[in-house]
Image: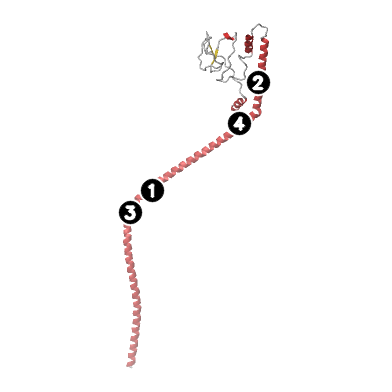
């Protein structure tokens, strides 16, 4: 009986020992995990401390650089303001140039319209001249030429009628009178004498030998007269010096002004040009 109780006690003790072993094993595992956690926490604390030192150093550096950064910020703000003002000025200049260009384009368009209208009017006037005015002028010119020829023929006819051959006058006198009746003082010519080209010497007769000599000046319609002078070296007719001084003659002062000669008949092109200009 005692043996059974001892065996029962022994079994109970063994069961407790086994339970304690199992509990110890479990506790060992828990302790290992706790140790690992402690080590991890210690490592984290070390890293945190080192990071804290670095952050504090960086914070100190940032605090030290704050005045410089603020100065740079002020400089950048000033530059930004200056650039903004310059940009506004450039935009205003661009707007002004654009307005000036638009105004200039409008003025050019208006001028172009005016010139186009003027060109159209000139073209119409040119057509009118070519179709109406120029033919009329040509007709008038032909009539004037015809009248001139008729007047010359009439003068020649009158000179032959007014100066008969049996008047007893010398041939020189009759020639001079015929020339006076024809309105000429020398041989007939087709146009005015060219300046600087020697002309034939005038023919003198007993009538015009005693006449007051005249000296043509540079102004048309002004005749310079003077008394007879001693014989001078022979010069071709109309080959006068343009600055000869006026010579007085009796009560007639030098440089006496007479009615100017009528202007020559303009050519067809000159009259057409004048009509266009009007």
Mark closest to the chain's N terminus, 4 or 2? 4
Task: Judge depth for marks 2 and 3 and give the one in front.
Answer: 2
Find residue 134 and report its image quarter: top right
Task: Judge depth for marks 3 and 4 and give the one in front.
Answer: 4
- Name the residue at the top extreme: 168
Dot 3 surroundings within 10 Å: few (below 14), some, or many (20 or more)?
Answer: few
Mark closest to the chain's N terminus, 2 or 3? 3
Image spot of residue 203 (x, y percent): 59, 12
- Name the residue at the front extreme: 233
Image spot of residue 215 (x, y percent): 54, 14
**39, above or below 81, in the image:** below
Q: Count of labels shown? A: 4
Dot 4 surroundings within 10 Å: few (below 14), some, or many (20 or more)?
Answer: some
**6, above or below 86, in the image:** below
Task: Judge depth for marks 4 and 2 and give the one in front.
Answer: 2
Spatial CA span between label 1 and label 2:
94 Å
Give whichever of 89, 219 is nearer the camera.
219
Q: Is residue 223 visible?
A: no
* Residue indicated by mark 1: 77
Q: How is colour applied across the structure in the image? A: secondary structure
Residue visible at 33% across and 53% down in the picture: 66
Report whether 24 appears left or right of 222.
left
Image spot of residue 53 (x, y percent): 31, 61
Which of the image's four quarters has the C terminus?
top right
**Res 145 label:** 2
* Residue indicated by mark 4: 122
* Residue indicated by mark 3: 65
Dot 2 surroundings within 10 Å: few (below 14), some, or many (20 or more)?
Answer: few
Task: Judge depth for marks 1 and 2 and give the one in front.
Answer: 2
Spatial CA span between label 1 and label 3:
18 Å
Could you tell me which secondary element the residue under label 2 belongs to?
Answer: helix
């Amino acid at each position: 009986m005692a043996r059974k109780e001892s065996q029962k006690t022994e079994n109970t003790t063994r069961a407790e020992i086994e339970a304690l072993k199992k509990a110890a094993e479990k506790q060992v595992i828990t302790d290992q995990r706790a140790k690992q956690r402690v080590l991890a926490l210690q490592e984290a604390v070390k890293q945190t401390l080192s990071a804290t030192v670095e952050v504090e150093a960086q914070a100190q550096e940032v605090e030290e650089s704050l005045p410089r950064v603020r100065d740079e910020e002020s400089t950048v703000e000033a530059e930004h303001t200056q650039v903004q003002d310059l940009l506004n000025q450039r935009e205003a200049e661009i707007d002004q140039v654009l307005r000036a260009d638009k105004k200039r384009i409008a003025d050019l368009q208006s001028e172009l319209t005016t010139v186009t209208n003027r060109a159209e009017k000139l073209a119409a006037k040119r057509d009118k001249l070519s179709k109406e005015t120029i033919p009329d002028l040509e007709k008038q010119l032909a009539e004037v030429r015809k009248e001139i020829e008729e007047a010359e023929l009439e003068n020649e006819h009158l000179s032959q009628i007014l100066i008969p051959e049996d008047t007893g006058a010398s041939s020189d006198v009759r020639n001079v009178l015929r020339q006076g009746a024809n309105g000429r003082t020398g041989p007939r010519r087709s146009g005015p004498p060219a300046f600087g080209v020697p002309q034939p010497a005038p023919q003198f007769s007993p009538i015009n030998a005693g006449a007051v000599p005249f000296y043509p000046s540079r102004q048309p319609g002004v005749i310079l007269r003077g008394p007879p002078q001693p014989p001078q070296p022979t010069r071709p007719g109309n080959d006068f010096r343009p600055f000869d001084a006026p010579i007085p003659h009796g009560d007639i002062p030098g440089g006496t002004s007479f009615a100017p000669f009528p202007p020559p008949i303009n050519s067809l092109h000159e009259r057409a040009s004048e009509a266009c200009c009007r």
